[in-house]
Amino acid sequence: METTNQESLKEELMTSDPEFRELAREHGRYEARLSELSSLTYPSDEEQLEEITLKKKKLAIKDQMHSMLLQYQKSRDSSH
């Protein structure tokens, strides 16, 4: 899938699919918190564990969003 095509599909899904939009927001929140955690010089054990957990959650959401994009693209392509 071309990057520009993928970006336009992503924009369409952001507009039309509330579930996709919520996943994108959640992904952004995880990204922001991970950025905060990675800037800590001496993270506590809890913060290190949170960072690991957030990375896993963020990756799971990214996979879910990618899957939705592929499904959306297939349904679009088959309707043309």
Image (spheres, rainbow, N blue to C red):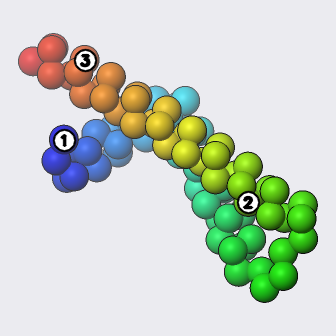
Q: Is residue 66 left or right of residue 59?
A: left
Residue at (69% x, 74% y) in the render: 38
Label 1, residues with CA under 10 Å away: few <14, some 14-19, many ≥20: few
Q: Few, some or many C-alpha atoms within 10 Å of disc 3 (few <14, some 14-19, many ≥20)?
A: few
The residue where tag 2 is placed is 51
**Vertical position of residue 30 compared to residue 69: above or below:** below
Q: Is residue 7 left or right of residue 62?
A: left
Residue reaching furthest to the bottom: 41
**Spot occupied by residue 18 in the image (x, y as percentages of width and height):** 53, 31
- Residue 77 percent coordinates (x, y): 15, 22
Looking at the image, residue 33 sits to the left or right of residue 50; the answer is: left
Residue 66 versus residue 7: which sits nearer the camera? Answer: 66
Where on the picture, by quarter, is residue 60?
top right
Q: Residue 75: which disc? A: 3
Q: Earlier in the sequence, mark 1 or mark 3?
A: 1
Name the front one of labels 2 and 3. 2
- Front one among 24 and 44: 44
| Picture coordinates of residue 25, whole percent (x, y) | 59, 48
Q: Is residue 44 above or below residue 80?
A: below
Tag 2 and tag 3, C-beta contact below 8 Å: no
* Residue to which mark 1 is pinned: 1
Mark found first going from the N terminus, 1 or 2 = 1
> What kind of residue is marked 2?
Glu
Determine the residue positioned at 16% across, 47% down: 2
* Disc 2 packing (10 Å; few <14; some 14–19; many ≥20): many
Q: Amino acid at mark 1?
A: Met
Of discs 1 and 2, which sits in the foreground? 2
